[in-house]
Image: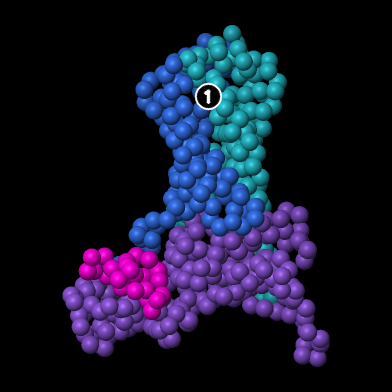
Amino acid sequence: MGQALNLSKELSIAGGVRQAKLWYLQRISAMVLGICVAIHLAIIFYAIRGGLTAGEILGRTQGNWLFAIFYEIFVLACFIHAPIGLANILQEHFPQSKWSIFFAWLLAGLILVLGSAAVWGLAVGGAS
Amino acid sequence: MQSRPVVSFRSKTHLSYWAYLLHRLSGLALALFIPLHFFVLSQSLRGQAGLEQYLRLTEMPIFKIGEWILVMFLTLHLTGGIRLLMIEFGPWRGLRKGSIQLGIILAIACGLLFLYLGSE
Amino acid sequence: MSEQALKVKVWRGAETGEFVEYLVPRNPNQTVLDVVTYIQRKLDPTLSYRFACRVGMCGSCAMTVNGKARWTCRTHVSHIVDGDSLEIAPLNNLPVIKDLATDMREFFTKWTDARGFFKGNKTRFDDFATVVPDSPERQLANAGIECIGCGVCYASCDVVALRPAYLGPAALNRAWTLVNDVRDTSQLERLRAVAGDAGCHVCHTQGECSERCPKALEPTAGIAGLKKLVGRAAMKGSQWGKL
C-alpha cells in the first residue's frame, strides 16, 4: 500500500516535471521564433515587391548557406513550438480524446520533414 | 428546466481576454498553414520548374487573401507572444494592455504593407 | 420611496433549474445584496443565499451578477443595472448546492493541494525569525497576501472551466506568497505541488482573475512567478533541490 502511494507520488512528480519542461521548451523556442519571425517578415516585405517568382526566390537562396542555416533554425524552432501549442489546445477542448498527442506528433513530423525538405530544396535544389 | 449558467461572454470584455483569444486563433491558423507552406516550398526539390508550378497556383485570389490574413496573424501572434514573454520572464508591470493595442496596430500596418507591396 | 421596480432574474434550483423573475422596489444607494435580501425576506422565503459581514470584508456574498463574478454587498445596483434588469446567478465553476449558494469545498481543497499553507521549523523556544520588510521576497509576498478566499477569481477563470483539476488562481496566488516566505521549510514540496497538468503552467494569462479581484490582487503575477520558478527548477534544479 505504501509502495503504491510512493509510485503514484513519483509518477505525479514526473508528470509535473514533464509539463514544466514542455512549458520551458515552448517559451525558449518562442524567443528564437521571435527573432526569426521578425527577420522573416522583413524578408517577405522586401521580396514580394513587384510579385514573386520561383526564379527570383531561387536566385537568392541557391547556394546561400546563411539562408540555409537561418531557415533551418527557424524550422527546428517551429518543430518544438507549434506541436506543444496544438497539444494544449486539443487537450483543453477535447479532454476525453486520446488523439491529442497523436496530432501533436503528426504536426511535429510534418514540420520537421517538410520544413527541412524545403530548406534543402531552396538552398541546394533538385533536378533542374 | 435548463442547465445552470456557465462562464459567459459578458465577463470577457477586457483586452487581456481578447489578446488570449486572438493569440490562440492565430497560433492555430499558423500551425495548420505551416505544413502547407513548407510543402509548396519543398517543391523546389523538383527544380525551378517544379517550384514555379506550385507558386503559380498560389496566384489565385483565394490564396492571396489567405496570405494577407496569415501575415496579419503572424504579426499578431508575434506581438502577443512578446507580450507573454515579458509577462512571464520580465519584471511585473501588470497585464501590459498597451502592448495589446500596439500589437493590433502593428498587425493592421503589416496587413496594409502586404497589400501595398504585393500589388505593385 | 421606490421610483420604479427592478426586474431581477434569480437562479432557482441547483445544477438544473431556471431563472425566476422578481419585481423589487428600486432605492437610491441599493446594493445587489440588498436586492437579494429583499427577495428572500419579502417575496420568497425559499431563496437560499450566503452573506455575512455585508461590508466588503468577508467575501461570502460573491455571486455572478449580469455575467460577472462580484461581491454583491459592494456592487451598487445603479452601477451595473441593465436598463431596469438584473441577472443574479451562483458563482461559476463551483457545484451549486441550492439557488445562489455554491459548494466551496473544491476551492479550499485545491488551496491545500497547492500547498497553500505554511510550515516552519521554529518553535516558541527559538528566537524570532527575521524577515526584512523591504526585501524583494517580502514585497512579492505582500502583494498577494490580502486574499480572503472569496472565490471570485476562481469563478471567472476559463481554464478552471476547461480543466476541472486546475488548481486555480487563488490557490496558486497563495502558494506564490508562501514561496516568498523565507521562513517556510517545505518549498520543494510546494514547487512539486504546483507543477503538472493542474498546475501553474496551464494558466493562459487571460487575466480574468486580476481583472475581477475585488481586492485588486493580481494572481496573474504570482502565477507568472511560479511558472518561471518551476520551469527553471525542472530544467536546472532550484535552491531547495531538484524537482
Q: Is residue C78 above or below residue B89?
A: below
Depth check, front residue: B45 or C57: C57
Q: Is residue B8 above or below residue A38?
A: below
- Identity of the residue furthest to the bottom in this view: C125
Which residue is disc 1 drawn over? A45
Identify the amino acid type marked 1: Phe
For residue C18, which quarter of the picture? Answer: bottom left
Q: Which residues are magenta?
A: C63-92
Q: Is A114 displayed left or right of C123 in the figure?
A: left
Q: Is residue C25 above or below residue C82?
A: below
Q: Which chain is cyan?
A: A
Q: Find chain C in the image and tell me its colour.
A: purple
Spot occupied by residue C201 in the image (x, y as percentages of width and height): 59, 57
The structure residue drawn at horizontal position 34% and vertical position 65%, both measured from the top left corner, is C67
In magenta stretch: residue C242: no
Spot occupied by residue B110 in the image (x, y as percentages of width and height): 48, 32
The chain under label 1 reads A
In magenta stretch: residue C82: yes
Image quadrant where one finds the N terminus of chain B: bottom left
Coloring applied to the structure: by chain
Depth check, front residue: B120 or C1: C1
Spot occupied by residue B44 in the image (x, y as percentages of width and height): 57, 17
Q: Is B58 displayed left or right of C78 in the figure?
A: right
For residue C198, which quarter of the picture? Answer: bottom right
Q: Which chain is blue?
A: B
The structure residue drawn at horizontal position 63% and vertical position 36%, both measured from the top left corner, is A35
Spot occupied by residue C44 in the image (x, y as percentages of width and height): 23, 85
Depth check, front residue: C206 or C211: C211
The structure residue drawn at horizontal position 47% and vertical position 21%, both measured from the top left corner, is B117
Residue C95 appearing in the image: no
